[in-house]
Amino acid sequence: MNRTALKIVYEDDRMIAVDKPAGTLVVPGRGEAAGKPLAAQLQARWNRKAYVVHRLDRETSGVVVFAKDAEAHKLLCGQFEARTVGKRYLAVVHGALEVPGSVDKPLRRFGSGRIGIDPRGKNAVTRYRPLRVHDGATLIHVFPETGRQHQIRVHLFSIGHPVVGDPLYHKGPPDGAPRLLLHAERLKLLSPDGEPLTLKSDPSEDFTAAFEAVKKARASAPSPGARRRRGSGPIPG
């Protein structure tokens, strides 16, 4: 195996945080993905089990945490279950989203395999804060308070601002993005030994390049009122 393929965000004797590329699975699943799942890569690296603490969608990039032993796994998973982990994502959404807000809508899986809003579903809460509007697309920070599958994507779609590059929930015309513009940028949690950790992942080159391509495409056909807020500058860290 090529061990340089893994980008390590943090590692100690009991846990590891990895920067997951878009298109890579965390664990084996249905369909094809780019390269081995992260869990398999780590198991090959250590020659022992990698304990999965949480997951990201295949199309999402960013920080993913694994434990190295069963006790560490229990301690880390307990924080996610208790919702004490601080999670921040970076996303680009369709439309001019100019006011911070939150979405509190229950989610469940339907027979098609898609996730949707349903009062019979599990509770799910997502907060968001706009950063910049670019000709009808908005760069935002997203703070999921729960960890349901496809939560951010479905919640933003439900308020009329689907994530750019989403092949599953964006029903409009093709937006030209080569990938889903959703990145798990930061996690705040305690290590298995109780040490406060802030795990950060800068947006990858493909995220930044895709965002620039979307901005250029939209600049050629600007929508009215889409330039009312900060319209230039690097992606915030």
Image: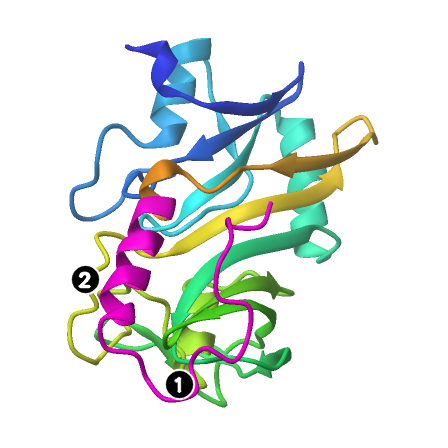
Give the numbered dot on residue 160.
1
Decide whether the magenta segment is chiefly helix, strand or loop. Answer: loop
Instruction: Tell me where the magenta segment starts and ends, as one range.
Output: 208-237
- Quarter of the image with the C terminus is top right
Q: Identify the residue shown where x is 74% and y is 31%.
A: 191
Residue 168 at least partly seen: no
| Dot 2 amino acid type | Gly
Q: Identify the residue shown where x is 47% and y is 21%.
A: 49
Q: Identify the residue shown where x is 24% and y is 76%.
A: 111
**Local SS, label 1:** loop
- Residue 54: within the magenta? no
**Local SS, label 2:** loop
| Dot 1 amino acid type | Gly
Q: Identify the residue shown where x is 66% and y is 20%.
A: 14
Residue 148 lies left or right of residue 127; in this view the side is: left
Q: Is residue 204 above or below residue 213?
A: above
Instruction: Give the mark nearest the N terminus, 2 or 1.
Output: 1
- Residue 222: within the magenta? yes
Quadrant of res 174: bottom left
Q: Which of 232 and 113 is in front in this view?
A: 232
Q: Mark 2 points at which residue?
A: 176
- Quarter of the image with the N terminus is top left
Using a 10 Å C-alpha cutoff, classify the residue at mark 2 as few (fewer than 14 neighbours), some (14 to 19) or many (20 or more): few
Residue 38 place in picture, x, y as percent: 38, 30
Q: In this view, does 220 lie above or below 5?
A: below
